[in-house]
């Protein structure tokens, strides 16, 4: 069977190349063809001998996804791509242009098993994990189309990154590799719905990536409704894990909190959230829910959102309200994919 070499790091390429009788330095050239020069046909890798090119054609392949749909916001600051993978799976990825640079939001799974009631990606459950190469390919899809550099990465697209731990970490190391994309660990954010043991594991990796936790509630009762997987992890334990992460990495954790009318946005909810978090240094990102077609949940009135934020600010909690980007192109989780599937089925 042919080996897919897209997503292999230098060491893995070396093992493959040297193991098949070619000199070690060929692996470096192969890496550069793949990740720097964007050459994906073995015949065009003219630095290699004919013998090596023939061997590559016979034994290797470069599995890159195909871009099947593209959407751009009116201000051109948000671009979303829908990609089709080798097995036909569909994956969404979004690039946001900020004043400080371009940020990409990547998916880590096809579908999602977590079942959050507001999220379009989880409607059909988990189909499969993405490989590190498939996550990396989302970045290269933008690079090939627009030839843009990336400043930061958020693992906040479809899927729960901490339940695809090994591939996600491999991807992070690839993205950080100075010979690939050279993204600093600090500019990589993993967003998780709070898989407690994996937060501890990540903290112990000793890499200073940023952790965002989708909290969305001030207590277990509300959280169990919004984020069903949380029945396995008490909210207090999620916050303790965040505290451990901060102590180990010195990176302040972000708590994401989707604001939903009549569910989690009252004055009492805000006060309870302050009590829950206590004195831990953190950042709170309030996200007025992006209403989707499939579920009748709505954002609170603007004055309620402000009131919620003000309570947190008064208690000394650094709190921002997330700017909505790309609303008109269905940039929220899973919406472009759902629309595409609805149009073809
Ligand atoms: N499983 C991970 C990452 C994917 S979801 C996690 O739970 O963090 C990441 C984020 O997508 C959520 O925190 C939430 O901020 C956002 N999101 C999903 N559906 C949304 C919706 N309908 N409106 C607003 N934000 C949404």
Image (spheres, rainbow, N blue to C red):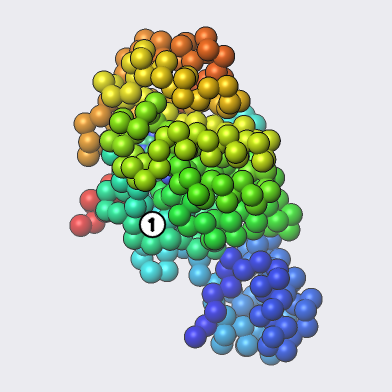
Residue at 28 percent of width and 24 percent of height: 263
- Answer with the quadrant where ligand 1 appears in the image: top left
Residue at 65 percent of width and 52 percent of height: 205
| Residue 140 at x, y percent in the picture | 57, 56
Q: How many marks?
A: 1
Tell me if the residue at label 1 has its CB under 8 Å from ligand 1. no
Residue 151 visible (yes or no): no
Q: Is residue 148 above or below residue 225?
A: below
Q: Is residue 338 above or below residue 257?
A: below
Residue at 47 percent of width and 38 percent of height: 238
Between 54 and 139, the residue placed more toward the observer is 139
Helix, strand or loop at mark 1:
strand
Left or right: 318 as drawn, with respect to 24:
left
Residue 117 visible (yes or no): yes
Between 268 and 24, the residue placed more toward the observer is 268
| Residue 326 at x, y percent in the picture | 42, 34
Neighbour class for label 1 at 10 Å: few (<14), some, many (≥20)? Answer: many
Residue at 53 percent of width and 12 percent of height: 315
Q: Is residue 269 above or below residue 345?
A: above
- Considering the image in quadrants, where does the C terminus appear? bottom left
Between 227 and 61, the residue placed more toward the observer is 227
| Residue 167 at x, y percent in the picture | 53, 60
Between 246 and 294, the residue placed more toward the observer is 246
Left or right: 281 as drawn, with respect to 68:
right
Q: Circle 1 sits on which residue?
A: 110
| Residue 245 at x, y percent in the picture | 60, 40
């Amino acid at each position: 069977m042919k080996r897919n070499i897209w997503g292999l790091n230098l060491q893995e390429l070396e093992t493959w190349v040297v193991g098949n009788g070619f000199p070690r330095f060929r692996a470096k050239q192969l890496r550069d063809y793949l990740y720097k020069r964007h050459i994906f046909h073995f015949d065009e890798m003219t630095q290699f001998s004919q013998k090596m090119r023939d061997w590559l054609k016979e034994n290797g392949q470069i599995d890159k996804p195909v871009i099947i749909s593209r959407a751009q916001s009116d201000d051109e600051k948000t671009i979303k791509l829908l990609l089709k993978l080798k097995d036909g799976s569909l994956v969404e990825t979004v690039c946001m242009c900020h004043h400080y640079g371009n940020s990409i939001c990547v998916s880590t799974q096809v579908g999602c098993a977590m079942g959050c009631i507001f999220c379009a990606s989880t409607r059909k459950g988990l189909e499969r994990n993405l490989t590190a190469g498939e996550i990396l390919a989302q970045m290269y899809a933008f690079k090939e189309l627009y030839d843009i550099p990336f400043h930061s990465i958020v693992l906040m697209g479809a899927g729960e990154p901490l339940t695809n731990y090994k591939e996600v970490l491999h991807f992070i190391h690839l993205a950080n590799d100075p010979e690939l994309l050279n993204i600093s660990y600090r500019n990589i954010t993993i967003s998780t719905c709070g898989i407690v043991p994996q937060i501890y594991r990540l903290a112990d990796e000793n890499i200073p990536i940023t952790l965002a936790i989708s909290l969305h509630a001030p207590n277990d009762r509300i959280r169990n409704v919004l984020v069903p997987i949380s029945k396995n992890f008490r909210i207090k334990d999620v916050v303790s894990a965040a505290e451990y992460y901060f102590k180990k990495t010195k990176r302040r954790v972000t708590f994401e909190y989707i604001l939903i009318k009549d569910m989690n946005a009252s004055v009492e909810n805000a006060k309870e959230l302050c009590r829950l978090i206590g004195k831990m240094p953190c950042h709170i990102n309030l996200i007025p829910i992006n209403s989707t077609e499939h579920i009748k949940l709505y954002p609170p009135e603007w004055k309620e959102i402000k009131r919620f934020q003000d309570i947190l600010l008064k208690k000394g909690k650094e709190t921002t309200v997330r700017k909505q980007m790309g609303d008109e192109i269905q940039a929220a989780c899973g919406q472009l994919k759902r629309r595409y599937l609805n149009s073809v089925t």
